[in-house]
Every structure is written in structure tokens, then in C-alpha cells.
Amino acid sequence: MGAALVCSAHDDPPQHPGPPLAPWEPQGPPRRSRTAVRALLAVVLVLALTALGLYVAKAGPFARPGADGPDPAAAAQARGFLADWSHDRLDAAGARTTHPAEASRILGSFTSGLEITRPRLSAGVPREAEGGAVEVPFTARMPVKGLGTWTYTSRMPLRQAKDGDGGRWLVDWKPGLVHPRLSGVAKFRLDREDTSEPKAKDRHGKPLTSAAAPSLAPVLAQLGDGGAGPRGAIRLVDRTSGEVLRTEARFGAKEATDKVAETTLDSTWQTAAEHALAAEPEDRNASLVALRGDTGEILAVANSPATGFNRAVSGTYAPGSTFKLVTSSALLMKGVVRPDTVVDCPKQLVVGKEFHNVETSFFPDATFRKDFTESCNTAFISLRDKLAPTALGDVAREYYGIGQEWHIGVPSYDGSVPAPKDETEKAASMIGQARLQANPLIMASVTATATTGRFRMPHLVPNPKDTTKTTPLPAQVTTDLRTLMRATVTEGTAHILSDLPGEIGGKTGTAEVSDDAPNNGWMVARRGNVAIACVVEGGVTGSGSAGPILHELLSRVPGDGE
């Protein structure tokens, strides 16, 4: 807070004023009257009191918590509530509220009653509310099994508990925070309609059905005019009478036709992908995409669980160290490194916060090749000052097509690499964290571009509309990336693929999700003309979770596949 003070003090007029001085005539030192001195002292006193007030209010021993905004503890409690809800820890979520039993019960009935498979909840910016409360807006993305995603926004109020409860912040429970229209008199109901499955065929003319390939259920439902697909609606109804008050969301409005949708899918690859995900031992959410590097044609799209949200092409995940393909492209194009450049790999590095490597590994005097094959986070972060703040986003868009509008034949999320807000975000972006967002579709495309040198828009249907504009990678960069990926299989973190035939290249990734959830595991690979990407939610490490899935997939499709 600042204040502008304008003061005017006039000396007493001379008793015998003479003629005025000319502008160039020297004047003697001004005389200060008692009035002027008093005014000056008043200004000094006001400024001193203002500074003291700021000290007491913001920095002094009597500083008020939240003087510069909401208490961070309230925001942390809100994020914890959303994390517990999204991971089905409903008792834990309820315990963060003012009415634990009611909260856990209503959260459970809301998600199970509407067949929501896995809520995805994102907190917004907290703000101070009346009476010392804090309000946190959030976005809810609710995947409704077999239909699609219901997206809406709501607000979560929090209040500080009484002193007897330690003064901790609690979510001020009311049904309306789950959804603004949920109340004691109105609830939601899911209505499904029986519809026929769309008709489709693979690239060789073979029929495609969700009976043979369960992962294709949400994909086939979204393909052109292939059929009606699953339809349904979420409706707000009166709790007593069951009367429909309004329709909140609709899914699948198409009518069935006899037209057979043509696709680029390959039944052999699709079947192999289904088996590979089914072999995942811990029944975690996972998805993968395989596509041709020379055309961008998608050969397989698979999700586990098979029905519900098509996370393979519409998911939003931090890509973790698989994004080092893009980071390495930027570093190599700028001439910052060559594969044999020495870039030390320390155990940890502090840039606003502490960054470390998986299992806190370190490799003194490592070459960039070693840093890549061992996925050394600290080495990549140490090179951040060699790139402009927008460099990663520029390379991702111009060379890899990320963030441009893709038309793959079904709705998809096409990625985001925003400019970092500060040095900590810039450091995290170097290793595929911060606010970077991708999915298996995007990372399979990145793998294909890195190893062929040119972006080709991925697509599920023949002759798609393509509005993307990209630049080919320099030939030497592509050669270096292929070499680095091959070395990652023969001597690095993707060694699980080394016993398979063919010159396979790979890159692993471990992506942090939150303080309350285990890391996601990633792996990308290239064999011949096919690029593949896989993510396992809560997989902890890429080599330990996504690695076995890709090994199983490539084992079932001998040779280069295409």
C-alpha cells in the first residue's frame, strides 16, 4: 500500500519587498519558517506510521494470516479433499469436512449411482469469502461408463474449525458443493438408451466389434456415421416424485445407419493391444496407442478398463520423461549438446524446490547420452538456462504439432506445452512436468516424429482433414534421437525390451501426479515403422509398469508389423 502526500508551506513574506529578481539573478538560500519545519516533520511522521502499519499487518510479529490472500492451509485441504474423492477414498474425503458421515455417503451415491468410473477434479484459485471463509472453485470431469465425460464447475467452501479442533480448515459440507444443483429436494439420475453398435471395418476390410476388441466400444461410438452408439442422459429429478426437472448432459445423439465406417485400425495390432493390457497384473487404469510413423495412421487404440473414458486419445497426463524427446530436440537443434557432451548428473538439484532422479540415482561426469538413457532429471534441468522460456512450447508446436488442432476421426485432446510462469516451472517442464499435458496418442506421435523426422497427423479414418502446419526436424537431430532411443533399450531404463527381435528404441517416463497419489508410469517405443506409447495410472515407474505391457504387445506382433 502506498500513499501520495502533497504539502505546501509558504515562508512569511518579507517586510520590505523590493523589485523582483530577474530569472538569471542568483538568489540566496531559502529561509525555513517554523510552519515549514512543522509540515516537514508531519510528513515524516505519517510515512513512519505507514511503514509501521505495513510491518505490523504483513511482516511484523502481529502479522495476520492470509493478509496477502487465503490461508495456504485451506487450499491444501481443498486439494486433499478433491484427491481423496477422485481416488475413491470417500471416508478420507468425508473426514476433511464438517459432516464426515454424510459427505462420504453422498459422494459414494453420486459417483456410483451415475456410474462415474473415475472423477477427475481440478482445483481453481482460492479466494476469501465472507466471515473469514475461503472458497475454492473446481472443475469436475466425470467419465460416465460407456457414454462420455460430463464436465461442470462447482465451488467448495471451507471454514476454520474452533480452537478445540486445532483451528484446522474443514470443507464446509453441503450437497451443493458436489454439484450446484444437488440438494435435499433434487438429485441426479442416469438414463440409458438401448442402441445398436456402429458398424466398422479395419484397414484390411475385416469387421471391427467391441465383442472382439472391448477397448473399441468408446471409439466405435464416436466414429462418423457408423451407427447410433450408446446414448443416454443425466437428468435432475425431484427426490420425492421423480419428476424430471432438467437434463444436465446428453451423450450420443446419432441415429443408426447401415453405413460401415472405414478405419485405419489393424485387427492384428488391436487384438495384441487388448491382450497386452489384459495382462497388466494389478488391474490399474492403462491405455496405449500404436501408429504408423510414415503416415500417422493409427493401428490400435486400447484402454483398461475397456469401457468408459477413452483416455488413450482424450486423457490429460503429464508425460514425464518421455517428453525428453522434445526437450532433447530443442537442445540438439540449438547446439547446446551432442550425445558425447559431458553433462553432470547430480543426485538432486534445487530450483525453487528440490528435484531428484528416480531412486535418487546420480552419474558424475556423465555424457548426454548417459543422461538420456538413464533418464537423469537433474542433468536436463541443469541445461534450462540454455533455452528461452518459450523454447519447449515452440519446438513442440512447430516440429511435433502439439497444441495444434488434430482431426483424427474422433474427439481427441491434442496436448499443451504452456510457457513456464517461473524458474521452478521451467525446470519441471524440462522433464515433462509442471503444466504440460499429453496422452498416449500425443506421445506415440512424438515418438514417430522424433524417429522419422517429420510430423504426420495421427488419424483413425482415411483421408482426414489436416490443418496442421509443421517443419521437419533436422536430419542430424533425427539420427541422434534414434541412436539415443536405441541405447536406452540396449543399456538404459528401457532394457526390458532388449530381448525382442528388431532394432527397438524406447524411452521411459515417471510422472508425478500429486503428493497424495503414486506416480504414473510411461513408456514409448519404436520398432520399424510403428511407434507406440503407453501410460499406466499409479504405475510408479515406466519400466516397471508400462514396460511389461509394451513387451507383451511387441511379442504378439512379430517383425515390424507394417
Image: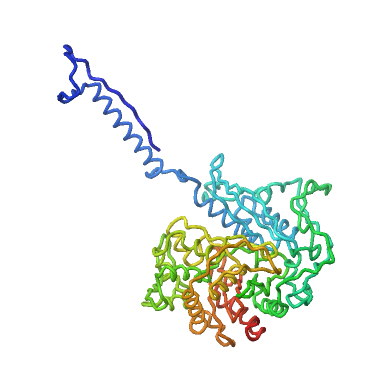
Residue 17: where, in percent of width, then height?
18, 13
Left or right: residue 256 versus residue 514 is right
Res 382 quadrant in image: bottom left
Residue 443: where, in percent of width, then height?
58, 70
Position of 428 relative to 346 (above/below)? above
Rendered image coloring scheme: rainbow
Left or right: residue 31 versus residue 333 is left
Residue appearing at x 77%, y 59% in the figure: 252
Viewer-closest of 561 and 455 = 455
Position of 508 relative to 81 (above/below)? below
Position of 214 relative to 120 (above/below)? below
Residue 211: where, in percent of width, then height?
79, 74
Marker count (numbered)? 0
Viewer-closest of 120 and 24 = 24
Viewer-closest of 269 and 458 = 458
Viewer-closest of 29 and 526 = 526
